[in-house]
Image (tube, helix red, strand yellow):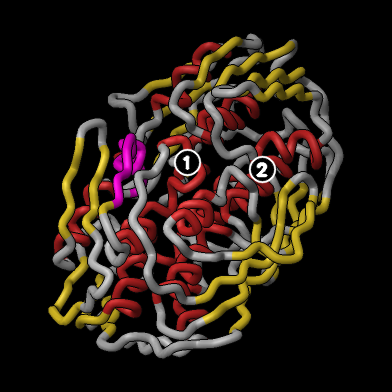
Amino acid sequence: MKNIISINQNINGFKKKTISVDGDKSLSIRFILLSSLSTGKCTAVNLLKSEDVISAIKCIKKLGIKIKLQDKNCEVGGKGLFGYKFSDNLILNAGNSGTTARLLCSLLVNSTKWIKITGDKSLQKRDMERIIKPLKLFGVKFKNKNKTLPIFIKGTELLNPIKFEENLGSAQCKSAVMIAAIKTKGQTKLKCLPSRDHTELMFKHVLDIPINIINKKNYDIIKINGLKEFKPFHYKIPGDISSASFFIVLALLSKKSSLIIKNVNINPSRTGIIKVLNLMGSKIQLLNKKYYKGEKISDIYVKSKKNLKGINLNPNLNSAAIDEFLLIFLVASICKGVSTFKNLGELNKKESKRLDWGIKILKMMGVRTQKIKNNGLKIWGQPNLKLKKNFVIKNYLKDHRIFMTSTIAALCLGGSWKIHDSDSFKTSFPRFSEILKSLGAKIK
């Protein structure tokens, strides 16, 4: 059947295998967007060639920026902070990429014409109000029927520096304010909940943008002085921890298996899944640690582990594991005892309603779950869980993480699985299937 994969047997144990995963998606998209604002040719090595990154490239090209992509190497001809060409009736399609759609708006704060930003059906369901609200304070105009795409945006040549309090813990909202600030005369001040800090690290260690970051106990203060042009730069993109996570869980749940994943970005704002799995009793190790342009990188060593235990997870770890909770739910399903997770409403604002889908898949597997107040979840683990039924996964808005998590469940826990929309992983991880097969997975 077209665009459906079948998995009917567990993966065999694999020992002392070494793999690498594709380049970090967050860094790849930020490289494309920010390099276009530099004063010359920027280059990247190991750029992720996923559909989300390609969408970012297409949008930036429509703004008059030349980009050359050859294998995993990329050249972007930056034209400075105000070098974009704004043509009449311009439409920018971000595909499935929320990062691209939201950060594009911040790049367009000085546009002289109305520009339409849109995306696929899944992206059109996602919240855009989180970036519209602060960008309006800069003086940007928006036209939109709802709080979602498509939207029309028109900038201004008289941008106002702002003071803004970000209370969602959204790295995309924070980054949108920061990028708008660099096109603004004066100082923008941002008070924000802790979230991924890739943009801050690029500003400080790559672009040399005047930025002052004050880390408080429960929030950060970020001050940015605008209108400083930045020079061309070279960037070597490490592996994506979100992509690596699928293989971490595969090795953890497969019998007699061990795996090293080389050169992965282990930014502390992204390694929540490692902390959570180690709390459950895994013994994942970080080897050969080093720093590159502010980002922390290492090899990851993981081996199969029995007798994992349920946890009552502190919500403070949610942000650092937000993209990996479907995998965490899967591991919780075979832990001894009850696992409790709280304040996961942000999951239902992703490409699909991931919290709801996580519950749905666990119930299909026969795992007892209970949704609790404030978008929380309890999972009663079954350490001897072995699946024997038929499972069909479809109508999930082509959410790449639902596809890949279902694939890992099928390979580790048994049963006969048919998973629709088998090209959905190309959104973030084009080599996912290829790497699985190199480890011995039987996928039809």
The spot of residue 1 in percent (x, y) is: 22, 83
Residue underneath mark 2 = 64
Q: Nearer the viewer, residue 277 or 117?
A: 277
The spot of residue 215 in percent (x, y) is: 67, 25
The spot of residue 365 in percent (x, y) is: 18, 68
Residue underneath mark 1 = 317
Q: Residue at x 65, y 14 (%)?
A: 189
Left or right: 33, with 194 as reference point: right
In the image as oriented, which residue stretches furthest toward the right?
231
Left or right: 238, with 103 as reference point: right
Foreground label between 1 and 2: 1
The amino acid beneath tag 1 is Leu
Q: Is residue 341 magenta-colored?
A: yes
Q: Residue at x 14, y 78 (%)?
A: 390
Q: Earlier in the sequence, mark 1 or mark 2?
A: 2
The amino acid beneath tag 2 is Gly
| Circle 1: element type | helix
Vertical arrangement, residue 431 with respect to residue 140, above or below: below
Q: Nearer the viewer, residue 399 or 312?
A: 312
| Circle 2: element type | loop
Q: Residue at x 28, y 77 (%)?
A: 413
Vertical arrangement, residue 50 with respect to residue 71, above or below: above
Task: Point out which mark residue 143 bears.
Answer: none
Please indicate, yes or no, whether residue 156 appears anywhere in the rendered image. yes
Please report the bounds of the magenta region as a residue range. 339-351
